Image (cartoon, grey):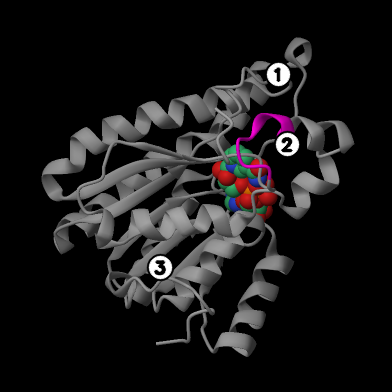
């Protein structure tokens, strides 16, 4: 087993588990790939950003002697997503943990939104969460259980404007989570939504976090510190591990106390 980072909680139940993460090439997803690898999990991830994804694999091999499996896959293509899940299963065995992390929060104008763009936003931000769960469920059933973690967003609770298709998808994820939890509870497959607050990823900092937004974040969070990707990963590790074995159909919000 690779060496855990200093101070990192060890989850023995994750050692050797087959974990599948969407959007694992950058930001929060990349932190998930790294830290599940450090728990001894066999990690496969999909992304469309080839360069950072391959760079992540090289860095992890060099720094930690772990080798996640990177598969190029646009999750809008449901058949390609199912193929990637099959490939991960062949490489690492039946998947025990599925993390639906990939999303695209590109801002879009209310008045200019077309039917095609609406469908495309939902095809990235909601539809894959259902079809990936449908694909991994038989694998989890064979093993007597599993954990599915869907990444939501506080944005719709804050009535945030500028991206109605994204916020609708993220609200839908919470409904989907509870439906799947009801469907698969008898198989000991747990399904939860993990909701990050405003996390200081390079993308957020470069695109949207200007001084006014930074002030708004500080004013609204109870804890006046910036959220980092690792704060979200800490919760994901817990939700994936057997330590949360009776926790399902829930929404866990890690936002420093904003909503
Ligand atoms: N960062 C935040 O402040 C924040 C806040 C609330 C919710 N979230 C949620 O947390 C999750 C991770 O957020 P993030 O900030 O790390 O996102 P991000 O946009 O920085 O990274 C998303 C990753 O998904 C990949 N991706 C995008 N479209 C894809 C596609 N069609 N097929 C395959 N891969 C694709 C990207 O290349 C990228 O590596 C998302 O679900 C997001 O909605 C993030």
Cα gap from disc 1 to disc 3, whole angstroms: 37 Å
Q: Secondary structure at mark 3?
A: helix
| Residue 22 shows in this picture | no
Circle nearer the viewer, 2 or 1: 2
Q: Quadrant of residue 18?
A: bottom left
Label 3: which residue? 88
Query: Is residue 137 positioned above or below 169 on the image?
Result: below
**Mark 3 closeness class: few <14, some 14–19, many ≥20 residues within 10 Å:** many
Mark 1 and mark 3 residues within 8 Å of each other at the beta carbon: no
Relative placement, left or right, of 215 versus 176 is right
Q: Earlier in the sequence, mark 2 or mark 1?
A: 1
Residue sitting at the far left: 186
Quarter of the figure that contains the N terminus: bottom left
Cα gap from disc 2 to disc 1, whole angstroms: 20 Å
**Mark 1 closeness class: few <14, some 14–19, many ≥20 residues within 10 Å:** some
Q: Residue at x 25, y 61 (%)?
A: 242
Q: Earlier in the sequence, mark 3 or mark 2?
A: 3
Label 2: which residue? 218
Residue span colored magenta: 217-224
State how many labels appear: 3
Label 1: which residue? 161
């Amino acid at each position: 087993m690779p060496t855990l980072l200093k101070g990192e909680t060890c989850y023995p139940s994750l050692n050797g588990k087959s974990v599948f993460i969407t959007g694992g090439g950058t930001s929060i997803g990349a932190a998930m790939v790294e830290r599940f690898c450090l728990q001894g999990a066999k990690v496969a991830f999909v992304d469309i950003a080839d360069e950072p994804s391959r760079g992540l694999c090289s860095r992890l091999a060099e720094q930690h002697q772990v080798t996640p499996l990177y598969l190029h896959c646009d999750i809008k293509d449901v058949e390609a997503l199912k193929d990637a899940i099959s490939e991960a299963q062949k490489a690492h065995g039946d998947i025990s943990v599925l993390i639906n992390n990939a999303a695209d929060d590109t801002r879009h104008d209310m008045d200019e939104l077309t039917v095609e763009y609406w469908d495309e936003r939902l095809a990235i931000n909601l539809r894959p969460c259902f079809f990936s769960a449908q694909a991994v469920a038989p694998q989890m059933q064979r093993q007597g259980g599993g954990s599915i973690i869907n990444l939501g967003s506080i944005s719709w609770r804050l009535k945030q404007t500028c991206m109605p298709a994204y916020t609708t998808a993220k609200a839908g994820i919470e409904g989907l989570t509870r439906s799947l939890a009801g469907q698969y509870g008898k198989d000991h497959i747990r399904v939860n939504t993990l909701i990050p607050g405003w996390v200081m990823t390079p993308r957020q900092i470069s695109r949207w976090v200007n001084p006014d937004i930074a002030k708004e974040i500080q004013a609204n969070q109870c804890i006046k510190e910036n959220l980092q990707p690792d704060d979200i990963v800490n919760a994901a590790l817990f939700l994936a591990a057997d330590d949360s074995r009776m926790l399902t159909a829930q929404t866990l919000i890690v936002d420093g106390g904003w909503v």
